[in-house]
Each structure stands twice: as C-alpha cells, then as structure tokens.
Image (cartoon, helix red, strand yellow):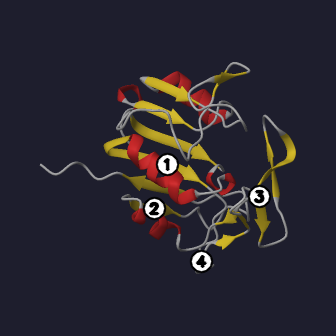
C-alpha cells in the first residue's frame, strides 16, 4: 500500500474509524454522504453531498477511493463503478467492502427501479442500518456474488478479492475488494 501522506483520497462516508484514520494520514481527503433530493457537490447539514452514480468531481481527481458497505445501497451499481473509475487517477486504487458471498455464482438483485421511478422488489426487502439515517433505514438493492470482480472489470478496473482469514468467526471478517485503474499506456 502506498504512503497515505502522498495520496488524494475520496471516502464515500463522513464518519467511522476509517474516516478518523484517513483524516490523520491522507495528503488530502474528501468525505461525502448521499442525501435524497440534495444536489451533488452541495452541502447538507455540514456534509458534502454526492451521488456515486453521478459524481461532481473532475476526471482523475483521486489516487485512492475507499468505502465500506455502500454499493449495495446504490440503485445502478454499473453507473457507480463507471463514475468511480472516472474520478480515480490512472494507477489509482479503490478499496471497499460490500456484502459479498463468493459461494454464490451471481449477485442477487433484491430490487430495481421501474420506468416510472418506483421500486420493484425482486426479493423480500432488506434494509440496513446507517449512522446518519438510523436503524433499518437504507434499502439494500443487492447482495454481491462471485460475479462482482467481473462487474468491476466491465467498468475498466483490474479487480481482486482479499478473503478474510478462515480463523475469523462468521461475519466478523469481511472480504476486501481491490479495484485498480490501470496506468495510462506509455
């Protein structure tokens, strides 16, 4: 892992232990949250707002992007992956976690947007807790399966899954995903 003190970092959250670490060590750090109905790039309750499906940042703005348990809450993850790729510098790295079940051959799509902007539930709805919104307030659109690296590759990333130690009790160890934007051709 490169020296954080030399990196411009984007974290898709404004709270938590990872944020505290990044604040202390990154050269520069942008934190954000998503709020319904708030324009990307604006501030709401003192927090920078972004929609990961349509980020307000310039191309190639960051060396490192981090997020934990975010992308399962995004209606169109393919758009999100494309946007994250766009704002990551060539050679940059994205480190993240999501609910990931490598034993499932495919991602389980739990819900989708309808043509009129509504939500169609394909599975019983699942709602996760959120530090800003409270318990059981954020819809999970999907649970990722073994095809997640392929989804990242489709957006242009080189992807790798780091599996937790088998000695960590169930659900306490998370898979960490690394998605690297290839360096520009010489």
Q: Is residue 15 left or right of residue 157?
A: right
> Which residue, given by chain and number where applicable, does mark 1 sit on?
95
Give the total of numbered labels.
Answer: 4
The residue under the point 51% across, 54% down is 79
Mark 1 Cα shell of 10 Å, populated few (<14), some (14-19), many (≥20): some
Q: Where does residue 48 sit, x and y in percent of width and height?
A: 61, 25
Element at label 2: helix
Separation of residues labelled 1 and 2 (CA atoms): 12 Å
Work out whether mark 2 precedes mark 4 in sequence or the reverse, and give the earlier one: 4
Q: Are marks 1 and 2 in contact (CB under 8 Å)?
A: no
Element at label 4: loop
Separation of residues labelled 1 and 4 (CA atoms): 21 Å
Q: Where does residue 63 sit, x and y in percent of width and height?
A: 37, 37
Work out whether mark 1 precedes mark 4 in sequence or the reverse, and give the earlier one: 1
Identify the image quadrant of residue 89. top left
Give the number of the disc on residue 152. 2
Q: From the image, state whether disc 4 or disc 3 is nearer to you.
A: 3
Element at label 3: loop
Work out whether mark 3 precedes mark 2 in sequence or the reverse, and give the earlier one: 3
> Which residue, given by chain and number where applicable, does mark 4 sit on?
106
The residue under the point 46% across, 47% down is 83
Q: Is residue 100 left or right of residue 82?
A: right
Q: Is residue 44 left or right of residue 166?
A: right
Q: Nearer the viewer, residue 166 or 121?
A: 121
Q: Where does residue 174 sit, x and y in percent of width and height?
A: 63, 58
Give the number of the disc on residue 118. 3
Q: Nearer the viewer, residue 84 or 116?
A: 116
Q: Is residue 57 above or below residue 88?
A: above
Separation of residues labelled 3 and 2 (CA atoms): 26 Å
């Amino acid at each position: 892992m490169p020296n954080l003190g030399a990196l411009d970092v984007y974290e898709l959250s404004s709270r938590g232990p990872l944020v505290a670490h990044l604040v202390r060590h990154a050269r520069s750090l942008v934190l954000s949250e998503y709020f319904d109905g708030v324009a990307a790039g604006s501030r709401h309750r003192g927090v920078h707002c972004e929609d990961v499906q349509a980020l307000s940042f310039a191309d190639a703005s960051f060396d490192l992007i981090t997020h934990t348990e975010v992308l399962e809450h995004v209606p169109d993850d393919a758009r999100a992956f494309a946007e994250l790729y766009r704002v990551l510098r060539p050679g940059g790295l994205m480190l993240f976690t999501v609910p990931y079940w490598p034993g499932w051959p495919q991602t389980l799509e739990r819900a989708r947007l309808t043509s009129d902007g509504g939500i169609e539930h394909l599975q019983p709805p699942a709602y996760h807790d959120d530090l800003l919104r409270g318990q059981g307030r954020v819809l999970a659109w999907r649970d990722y399966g073994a095809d997640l690296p392929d989804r990242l590759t489709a957006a242009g990333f080189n992807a790798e899954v780091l599996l937790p130690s088998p000695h960590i009790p169930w659900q306490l160890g998370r898979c960490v995903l690394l998605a690297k934007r290839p360096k520009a051709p010489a």
